[in-house]
């Protein structure tokens, strides 16, 4: 199974809301939830684009020399103590 960027997962959440509207939500609540998730998607996509530009590669694309990591991973470093 291929991993999806967070923005695509968020889009699927909106699609689920539109497919089957829960009975406990009224029209105002549905609209509010869609607007909230829509704004979150816009921000997430802007962040993803910024990271893509910084790293010089697309999401889950591997490259030669790494400029950084998308998931916050840092290479293992041996800690030394000065005496």
Image (spheres, helix red, strand yellow):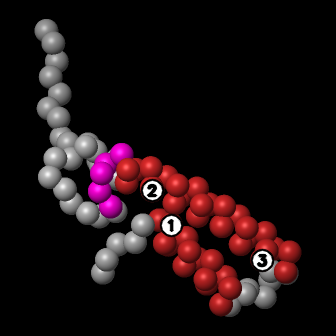
Element class at badge 2: helix
Q: CA distance from mark 1 to mark 3?
A: 20 Å
Magenta span = 54-58
Residue beneath the point at 50% across and 72% down:
9
Sequence-wise first label, 2 or 1? 1
The residue at which mark 3 appears reads as 30
Q: Nearer the viewer, mark 3 or mark 2?
A: 2
Which of the labelled discs sits on residue 48, or is there none? 2
Residue beneath the point at 73% across and 87% down:
21
Q: CA distance from mark 3 to mark 2?
A: 26 Å
Report whether 83 appears left or right of 57: left
The residue at which mark 1 appears reads as 7
**Foreground residue among 58 and 80:** 58
* Vertical arrangement, residue 49 with respect to residue 83, above or below: below
**Foreground residue among 28 and 61:** 61
Tell me which secondary structure the magenta stretch mostly adopts. loop
Sequence-wise first label, 3 or 2? 3
* Vertical arrangement, residue 75 with respect to residue 40, above or below: above
> Which quadrant would residue 11 be assigned to in this image?
bottom right
Residue beneath the point at 45% across and 56% down:
48
> Dividing the image into 4 quarters, which one contains the N terminus?
bottom left
**Foreground residue among 49 and 73:** 49
Sequence-wise first label, 1 or 3? 1
Report whether 42 appears left or right of 79: right
Report whether 48 appears left or right of 60: right
Element class at badge 3: helix
* Cβ atoms at labels 2 and 1 below 8 Å apart: yes
Residue count near mark 1 (Cα–Cα under 10 Å), binned few <14, some 14–19, many ≥20 = some
* Vertical arrangement, residue 40 with respect to residue 24, above or below: above
Is residue 10 part of the magenta span, yes or no?
Answer: no
Q: Position of residue 78 (x, y in %)?
A: 14, 32
């Amino acid at each position: 199974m291929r991993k999806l960027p967070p923005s695509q997962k968020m889009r699927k959440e909106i699609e689920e809301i539109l497919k089957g509207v829960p009975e406990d939500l009224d029209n105002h609540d549905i609209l509010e939830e869609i607007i909230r998730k829509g704004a979150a998607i816009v921000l997430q996509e802007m962040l993803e684009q910024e990271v893509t530009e910084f790293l010089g590669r697309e999401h889950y694309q591997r490259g030669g020399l790494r400029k950084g990591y998308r998931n916050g991973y840092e290479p293992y470093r041996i800690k030394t103590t000065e005496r």
